[in-house]
Image (cartoon, grey):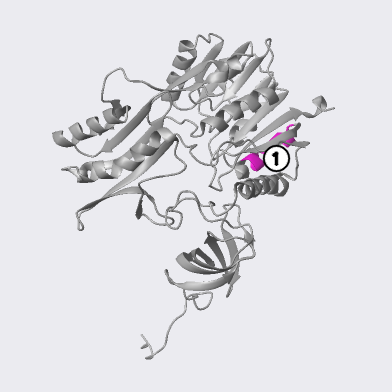
Amino acid sequence: MSKTRPGLRFQPTGGQRAVQVPTGKKQRLTIERLSSDGRGIAFFEGRTWFVSAALAGEEVEARVLNAHGKVVEARVERVLQANPVRRAAPCQHFARCGGCSVQHLPHSEQLALKQRHLAEQLARVAGVEPVQWALPLVGPEFAYRRRARVALRWDAKARRLDVGFRAEASQDIVAIHECPVLVQALQPIMTGLPQLLQAFAKPQVLGHVELFSGTATAVLLRHTAPLAEPDLAALRAFCQQHEAQLWLQGEGLPTADLPGQVLSFGLEPWNVELVYRPGDFAQVNETVNTAMIAQALEWLAPTANERVLDLFCGLGNFALPLARQAREVVAVEGVASMVERAAANAASNGLNNVAVFQSDLSQPLSVSGWAAQGFSAVLLDPPRDGAFEVVRKVSELGAERLLYVSCNPATLARDTVELLRQGYRLKRAGILDMFPQTAHVEAMALFERARTLV
């Protein structure tokens, strides 16, 4: 065996590995444009930089959060030359909290960003533009969020309980005593929560807290071991002071501290009340949710003699209002607990024309009894993964109209390709501003069979 000569270095195939950009490094950059998630894009020394809190055309000094390959993620430290539309962030925690990422944009610019993202996805992926663009559905900029998850972490070394929200690109917790996007009913609870929990005798057993506001206000505490009696007493007193239900979750499912307590929210235009439990999916923005349902009913326009299919029905957010207009609504959901909840909600609201079924909607639609008679119209509200397997067979149901509510323009555009292939046309589309101060885009799209278009 030959000896390796001193000083000889062996390089991996492909040449010398590029030196990585160190975390914390500060760099002056010129921002070229905004990405779909609202971050500024800059190019420097062969790398693409994604810079949060930056705007197009700005000169900034950015601090590196992390880097991998040719991509660097960073955050603005100083704005050296500002875009004229920039505004001062309304929240004092904007510089650190990872939640509301586009507060430095006026609301009108936030809407324009979301509209561009939806249009670009539909054009680039599906090569299509709707016959008609709808105006954005909007609500209040702030005080809209009726549900929030508060992070807790016990720092054993510092003997300190951190209470707040996650920092951007980090597991660090930003201490927060107020959050402008929470509904007013949750504001005093959020303000008093840190002091309450930090005074616990056994804070190390705390997991996280969830806050809810609907027909009642509620606090859910997740804990990894039994609470000390003084801690539980303090928590009960706090909830009583704020007229909030207390829910606890140890190893099992969430349980109300007082038996018989119920969480629900109303859909007033349709005289519907939906009961839910912590852990169930419910839209966080009441105003936009109500407007979304109203627009869905207007676009889909079900009549009193039609049979309508609601896929990914959840608690019945669309199915029950639909049932006020259609002859029959078939609601399908993959999660067994949500199927039970939707069926119970239909019964408690006296809607006997709703039938709820369980089916794995990540798989192609099977020939099921509930599908045998076909449908005049279909509504689907899938998760971020979209509904590709479902839409592959949707034309076999005979629906003339299909309304797609999306929380991810990329998968909506992908599924649009399949719907176009089956003979549907994109009649209308528009954004739903469910999460102001963030770049998250929700959208609604109406598809009709080509022959029905005038």
Q: Residue at x 75, y 45 (%)?
A: 127
Per the image, the residue denoted by label 1 is 417
Mark 1 lies on a secondary structure that is helix
Q: Tell whether 427 sits left or right of 371.
A: right
Task: State whether residue 128 is above or below residue 334.
Answer: below
Q: Tell whether 197 sits left or right of 10.
A: left
Where is the C terminus found, in terms of image quarters? top right
Residue at the bottom extreme of this rendering: 6
Where is the N terminus found, in terms of image quarters? bottom left
Mark 1 neighbour class, 10 Å CA radius: few under 14, some 14 to 19, many 20 or more: some
- Total numbered labels: 1
Q: Which residues are magenta?
A: 412-422
Is 35 a magenta residue?
no
Task: State whether residue 287 is above or below residue 180.
Answer: above
Is 420 a magenta residue?
yes
The three-letter code of the residue at mark 1 reads: Val
**Residue placed most toward the observer, 24 or 4:** 24
Magenta stretch, overall SS: helix
Task: State whether residue 349 is above or below residue 11.
Answer: above
User: Percent from the top left, x then y, of residue 166?
Assistant: 39, 51
Q: Tell whether 48 sits left or right of 305.
A: left
Residue 231 in which image quadrant: top left
User: Percent from the top left, x then y, of residue 233?
Assistant: 18, 32
**Residue placed most toward the observer, 190 or 338:** 190
For the question of whether residue 227 can be seen, the reply is no
**Residue placed most toward the observer, 368 or 255:** 255
User: Percent from the top left, x then y, of residue 85?
Assistant: 63, 57
Q: Residue at x 31, y 31 (%)?
A: 242
User: Percent from the top left, x then y, of residue 287?
Assistant: 55, 31
